[in-house]
């Protein structure tokens, strides 16, 4: 599940999403995260054509 | 072994969270971490400490619409930003969180300086969390001194002291030092959650993952323990 880094174990499990510490760009890792959310939210689903793999803050 | 035994008896566990205000996954991740903690009958053992991580140190002090800040830094179109924002809004709403699409962005350095002060008073997480919730709900302008002072007072801090900090350069070094330390510890994603300086999770993890990490650093929930 994790790997060692300077005594700190870093979780290797994929995050649902994150913001890149160097660029600030935010990402959604799993397509089902957004897809399932949109299926539960008609307003948010709106006219979004596809599920991209990146979002921004 | 001694350390593990002490923790199983109920000692405090420090959870450090490197985050920035404009980061939507920091918002979602915080609520997931809180959910994981609240599932445990020994939730009082966990103390969350906020650590500063500016994602855009060069952001202007002037307010920008969300899409304006994105296009300024990364290019693209307003339509692309709106699409991504709606996607993020859907994720947040699925988890019962408000998510306004009309947020305004600006440089968060001054906010982080106040967070550092709040940390010194033992209220850093409470302060940042309330600011974050208000920001994403679209009910708070976190770049307004009076608004920040108001949130500070609502969590038991000195609003006048917050105003003084905002007109000075206090805590600037600590904000920058926090960011450096986060990177040095291996933050490949923000939020970056470090539990007891033993386990770390980059990005917003699912509640189950946070729950597993809590168990690893603090032992199983008491009700599950075999006596």
Image (spheres, rainbow, N blue to C red):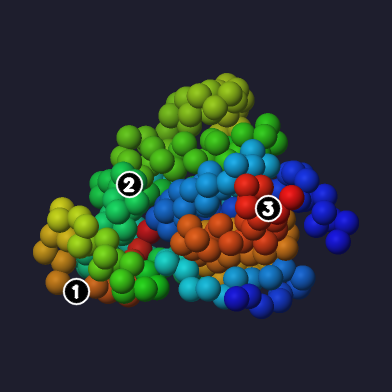
Residue depicted at x 55% and y 36%: B126
Quadrant of residue B161 in the image?
top right
Residue B209 position (above or below residue B97): below
Dot 3: element: loop
Residue A57 position (above or below residue B77): above
Chain ID of residue with mark 3: B
Report the residue marked by disc 1: A50
Mark 2 crowd level (few <14, some 14–19, many ≥20, 10 Å Cα): few
- The location of residue B185, given as percent across then percent down, is 68, 67
Q: Nearer the viewer, residue B111 or B189?
A: B189
Q: Residue furthest left?
A: A47
Dot 1: element: loop
- Left or right of B208, for residue B68: left
Chain ID of residue with mark 2: B
The answer to whether the residues at label 1 and label 3 have Cβ atoms under 8 Å apart is no
Residue A48 position (above or below residue B110): below
Report the residue marked by disc 2: B96
Dot 2: element: loop
Residue depicted at x 72% and y 68%: A8
The answer to whether the residues at label 3 and label 2 have Cβ atoms under 8 Å apart is no
Report the residue marked by disc 3: B225
Q: Earlier in the sequence, mark 3 or mark 2?
A: 2
The mark closer to the camera, 3 or 2, is 3
- Left or right of A9, for residue B109: left
Q: CA distance from mark 1 to mark 3?
A: 47 Å
């Amino acid at each position: 599940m994790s790997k060692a880094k300077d005594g700190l174990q870093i979780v290797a499990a994929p995050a649902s999403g994150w913001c890149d510490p160097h660029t600030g760009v935010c990402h959604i890792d799993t397509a089902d995260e957004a897809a399932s959310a949109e299926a539960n939210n008609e307003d948010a689903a709106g006219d979004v054509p596809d599920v991209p793999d990146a979002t921004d803050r | 072994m001694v350390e593990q035994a002490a923790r199983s008896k109920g000692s405090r566990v420090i959870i450090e969270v490197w985050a920035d205000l404009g980061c939507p996954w920091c918002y979602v991740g915080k609520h997931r971490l809180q959910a994981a903690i609240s599932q445990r009958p020994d939730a009082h053992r966990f103390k969350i400490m906020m650590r500063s991580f500016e994602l855009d140190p060069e952001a202007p002090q002037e307010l920008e619409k969300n899409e304006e800040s994105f296009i300024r830094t990364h290019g693209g179109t307003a339509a692309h930003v709106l699409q991504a924002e709606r996607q993020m809004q859907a994720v947040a709403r699925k988890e019962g969180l408000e998510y306004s699409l009309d947020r305004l962005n600006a440089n968060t350095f001054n906010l982080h300086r106040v967070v550092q002060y709040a940390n010194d008073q033992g209220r850093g997480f409470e302060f940042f969390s309330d600011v974050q919730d208000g920001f994403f709900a679209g009910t708070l302008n976190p770049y307004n001194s009076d608004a920040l002072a108001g949130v500070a007072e609502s969590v038991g801090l000195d609003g006048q002291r917050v105003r003084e900090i905002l007109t000075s350069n206090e805590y600037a070094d600590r904000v920058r030092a926090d960011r450096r330390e986060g990177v040095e510890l291996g933050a490949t994603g923000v939020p970056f959650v470090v539990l007891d300086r033993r386990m770390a999770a980059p990005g917003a993890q699912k509640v189950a993952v946070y729950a597993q990490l809590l168990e690893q650093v603090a032992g199983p929930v008491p009700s599950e323990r075999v006596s």
